[in-house]
Image (tube, grey):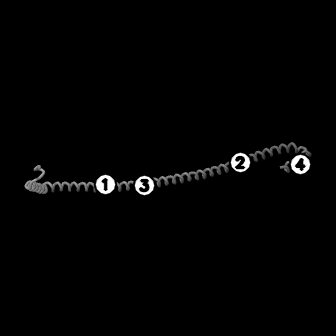
Amino acid sequence: MNPLVLPSIGLVFWTSIAFICLLIILRKFAWKPILGAIHEREQSIDEALNKAELAKQEMTRLTSQNQDLMQQARAERDEILKEAKTLKDGILNEAKKQAQVEGAKLIEKAKIEIENQKKAALAEVKDQVSSLSLEIAERVLRTQLDDKTKQEALVANLLKDVELN
């Protein structure tokens, strides 16, 4: 058989000694710095994860706060629009009432003015009728007073006219 396949006791002993020395040297000089670097890397990853979680929580809080502010702004906008509409409706109603009152006053004033003018016109017509009547009566009387029979006939006609009216 091959001597490489069947190791001798001396070879196993020196190989074990060399391996143990290598482990001691690695442990003293390389293992601690490697483990320290791994530990540092682990801590930096943990810190980064913690910071990311805090940032996520802050983003969630800010998003929630932003939504609350938006809802509040919408509610204020709706309230302002509602107040403006109420104010507009009140102003329109007040203007309509004032216009109706003014219109009623103008109509009443016009009715009074028409009535006054009507009375004045009637008074003027009555004056003209009475003056014309007096003139006619005067002329008729002058012509009729000359004869007594004509006077009696005139009085009878006048009495008939007065009874008819």
Disc 1 from disc 2: Cα separation:
92 Å
Residue type of the residue flagged with mark 4:
Ala
The answer to which of 79 and 116 lies nearer the viewer is 79
Mark 1 vs 2: CB contact within 8 A: no
Query: Which mark is drawn over residue 55?
Result: 1
Residue type of the residue flagged with mark 1:
Ala
**3 or 2: mark nearer the eye:** 3
Query: Circle 3: is it few (<14), some (14-19), or many (20+) Cα within 10 Å?
Result: few
Residue placed under numbered mark 4 in the picture: 156
Disc 4 from disc 1: Cα separation:
125 Å
**4 or 2: mark nearer the eye:** 2
Please give the name of the residue rendered at 13% of the width and 51% of the height, measured from the top-left corner.
5
Q: Is label 2 in a helix, a strand or a loop?
A: helix
Residue placed under numbered mark 3 in the picture: 71
Query: Circle 4: is it few (<14), some (14-19), or many (20+) Cα within 10 Å?
Result: few
Furthest residue in direction front, as rendered: 1
**1 or 2: mark nearer the eye:** 1
Mark 4 vs 1: CB contact within 8 A: no
Disc 1 from disc 3: Cα separation:
24 Å
Q: Earlier in the sequence, mark 1 or mark 2?
A: 1
Query: Circle 1: is it few (<14), some (14-19), or many (20+) Cα within 10 Å?
Result: few
* Quarter of the rendering containing residue 23: bottom left
Residue type of the residue flagged with mark 2:
Lys
Residue placed under numbered mark 2 in the picture: 118
Residue type of the residue flagged with mark 3:
Gln
Q: Earlier in the sequence, mark 4 or mark 1?
A: 1
Q: Earlier in the sequence, mark 4 or mark 2?
A: 2
Disc 4 from disc 3: Cα separation:
102 Å
